[in-house]
């Protein structure tokens, strides 16, 4: 982690709080790292990362 990732994580938490969503600090750090390094996140908790839009893949997508 560097200051750019930490700053971006803080902005994500703030921006989503303004929209009425709570983002945990660990999730914000993961999302900020993903965005800063232009990565794709593979996770079982895709719903925790609305800020990543198309940069997140659900490991086990919903069967709905």
Image (spheres, rainbow, N blue to C red):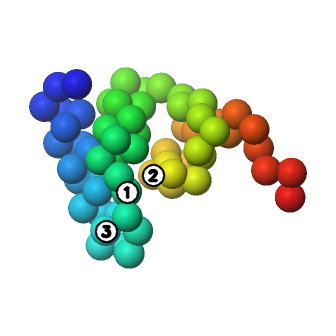
Compared across the picture, whether 21 is left or right of 61 comes to: left
Compared across the picture, whether 16 is left or right of 3 comes to: right
- Return the mark for residue 51: 2
Residue found 58% across the figure and 53% down from its top? 47
Q: Residues within 10 Å of mark 3 (few under 14, many from 20)?
A: few
Q: Residue 24, how many percent across, how many down?
A: 35, 52
- Return the mark for residue 17: 3
Q: Residue 5, how many percent across, how many down?
A: 23, 34
Q: Earlier in the sequence, mark 1 or mark 2?
A: 1
Q: Earlier in the sequence, mark 3 or mark 2?
A: 3
Image vertical order of residue 41 relative to residue 27, above or below: above
Residue 45 visible from this viewpoint: yes
Q: Circle 1 sits on which residue?
A: 23
Label 2 residue SS = helix
Mark 1 and mark 2: span between their CA atoms? 10 Å
Residue 19 appears in which quarter of the rendering? bottom left
């Amino acid at each position: 982690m560097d200051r750019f990732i930490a700053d971006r994580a803080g902005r994500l938490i703030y921006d989503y709080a303004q929209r009425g969503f709570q983002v945990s600090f660990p999730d914000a750090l993961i999302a900020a790292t993903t965005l800063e390094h232009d990565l794709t996140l593979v996770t079982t908790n895709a719903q925790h990362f609305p800020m990543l839009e198309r940069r997140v893949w659900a490991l086990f997508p919903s069967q709905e």
